[in-house]
């Protein structure tokens, strides 16, 4: 446990950011499609 705390979880953090960015992109794409349908 102590060793895990010493090592910085950079891989997990970067993966989290990537997942969040992907979700944001998906939401933006859905919003754009919805706006196009309204037009």
Image (spheres, helix red, strand yellow):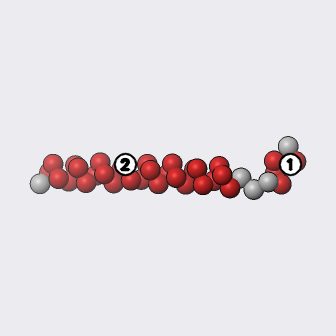
Left or right, 38 with reference to 22: left
Percent from the top left, x then y, of residue 2?
88, 48
Left or right, 21 with reference to 17: left
- Tally of marks: 2
Left or right, 9 with reference to 26: right
Q: Residue furthest left?
A: 39
Q: Kindly check if marks 2 and 1 are in contact, taking CB atoms under 8 A apart as contact.
A: no
Q: Nearer the viewer, residue 34 or 10?
A: 10
Left or right, 30 with reference to 14: left
Percent from the top left, x then y, of residue 12?
65, 49
Q: Residue furthest top?
A: 1
Percent from the top left, x then y, of residue 36?
17, 53
Between the C-alphas of marks 2 and 1, the distance is 37 Å
Query: Dot 2: within a 10 Å radius of its alpha carbon, few (fewer than 14), some, or many (20 or more) residues?
Result: few
Q: Nearer the viewer, residue 14 or 33?
A: 14
Query: Dot 1: within a 10 Å radius of its alpha carbon, few (fewer than 14), some, or many (20 or more) residues?
Result: few
Q: N-terminal of the two: label 2 or label 1?
A: 1
Q: Is residue 35 above or below residue 1?
A: below
Q: Which mark is residue 39?
A: none
Q: Quadrant of the C terminus?
A: bottom left
Taking the spot 44% from the left edge, 50% from the top edge, the residue there is: 22
Percent from the top left, x then y, of residue 29?
31, 51
Q: Quadrant of the N terminus?
A: top right
Q: Residue furthest front?
A: 11
Q: Which residue is label 1 attached to?
A: 3
Q: Which residue is label 2 attached to?
A: 26
Taking the spot 36% from the left edge, 50% from the top edge, the residue there is: 27
Element type at marker 1? helix
Q: Nearer the viewer, residue 36 or 11?
A: 11
Taking the spot 63% from the left edge, 53% from the top edge, the residue there is: 13
Element type at marker 2? helix
């Amino acid at each position: 446990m102590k060793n895990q705390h010493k090592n910085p979880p950079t891989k997990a953090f970067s993966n989290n950011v990537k997942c969040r960015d992907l979700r944001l992109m998906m939401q933006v794409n859905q919003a754009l499609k919805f706006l196009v349908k309204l037009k």
